[in-house]
Amino acid sequence: MSDSGNNNDHEFKNNIPVDENREAVLEEELSLTQQARSKGSYSFFASLMAIVTGLLVGVIILLIANPARAGQGLLTILRGGFTGSPTQFGQSIATSIPIIMTGLSVAFAYKSGLFNIGASGQFMVGGVCAVFVAIKASMIPASVLWIVCMLAAIVGGAIWGAVPGILKAYFKVNEVITSIMMNYIGMYLVKIIIEQTIYDARYARAQNVPARAEIPTLGLDTAFPGTNLNISLLLCLIFCLIIFIISSRTVFGYELTAVGLNPDASCYAGISSNRTVIMAMVIAGALSGIGGFMMYLGGTGVYMETNEIVALQGFNGIPVALLAMNHPMGVFFTGLFIGQLTIGGENLQLFGYSKEIIDMIIAVILYCAAFSLIFKQILYRIVSAIEKKRKRPGGVGPGGPDRYTQTGEREVSS
């Protein structure tokens, strides 16, 4: 009997820490779940604070330039393409399409800890590859020509993105430096390709893209007259969904995140950081190349020039990615928002303002988005302080955590 009693006591004593550990684990899991849910809220409000700060700076500039019409100017910026005109609305969407793709490129590369500032070069190289195929490949049926042009843009952008990725993976060269250099190399390469193969001397630019190679409209050009809006917007949404699934639902997406957080630890876990970095830049370059394809084969009257200017669409994709906190679906809606602001800035000229004011507002939003971690920290501290005040001093439940007496019975709080 004594042995049996000792065994029971021993089992009971061993069970107590197990129960307590189980409660601790459950509490920790609940805390982690709450943190995961609140993470998206913090990111959303941090982006919102960046936008509000940029608009406040814009209001100050409008007041300095022309106080009498500052209110009308702000309303014009906020309305953007929502002016009641289908043409204005369609134009704002068309403006958003290239920067959605370059923003998606920047956001995807950032998953692996890379800052793809070379989206402009990838955009231009992908664009010239698409235009070259559209003009020269007359033997390809019109029904599939635009798809072949998109594939050419993907290959061109991917190759241009692979170079910084390879240098980063095998030689530890900072991708910011190499991607900036590739922007200018790409700019001059595009100029050479145009002047040597598809040059139109009458207008000092590339030849017109044949209508048979343009992206299909599926009636959107009729719904939004004067804009030549096409299925590029639908393609952008599809690509954002694909990148979201890859990033959050696949093994490769997990490897991207692991390498971005800690390359050494990921290597220890058996993940090839070199392969992951290169693939991240290849895919990012391909996405930017698709943006160039959508820009120049969209039938919007935009042609490839030979002037020595780096495409701004790549740089404009950076604030799109930062505001979206590098979330693929957030990039889609943020790109539409930036497009709305751009059209609103152009409409400012109706009230005597300079359209460059919107560039200043977007620049301020960019800087604030870059400091979004500070905004998130401020929000976290505010929420934490509120939660501490709401918590009761006793732990879990109104009577505190359950306690046991020496006999193994629950201790009832009086």
Image (tube, rainbow, N blue to C red):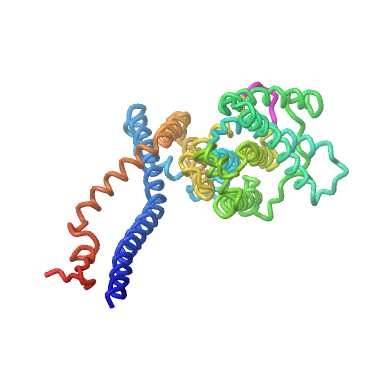
Res 91 visible: no
Front one among 355 and 370: 370
Q: Where is 3 relative to 220, above or below?
A: below
Q: Quadrant of residue 51?
A: top left
Q: Answer with the quarter of the image where residue 307 lies.
A: top right
Tell me what residue is drawn at x 36 percent, y 42 percent.
376
Q: Position of residue 20 (x, y in %)?
A: 30, 62
Q: Nearer the viewer, residue 249 or 379?
A: 249
Is 359 rendered above or below residue 17? above
> Which quarter of the image is occupied by the C terminus?
bottom left
Between 180 and 388, the one lying in front of the other is 388
Task: Give yes or no for residue 307 being in the magenta stretch.
Answer: yes
Above or below, 43 against 205 in this view is below
By secondary structure, the bulk of the magenta-drawn segment is best described as loop
Q: Residue at x 66, y 35 (%)?
A: 302
Rendered location of residue 296, percent (x, y): 69, 38
> In the figure, 144 relative to 369: above or below?
below
| Picture coordinates of residue 179, whole percent (x, y) | 61, 27
- Residue 407 is left or right of residue 344, and the answer is left
Q: Which residues are magenta?
A: 304-309
Left or right side of 174 for 202:
right
Q: Residue furthest right?
A: 139
- Residue drawn at (59%, 39%), measured in percent from left and top? 102
Kindly tell me whether residue 358 is visible in this rendering.
yes
Q: Which percent across, then down, holds residue 381?
A: 28, 44
The outermost residue toward the front is 2
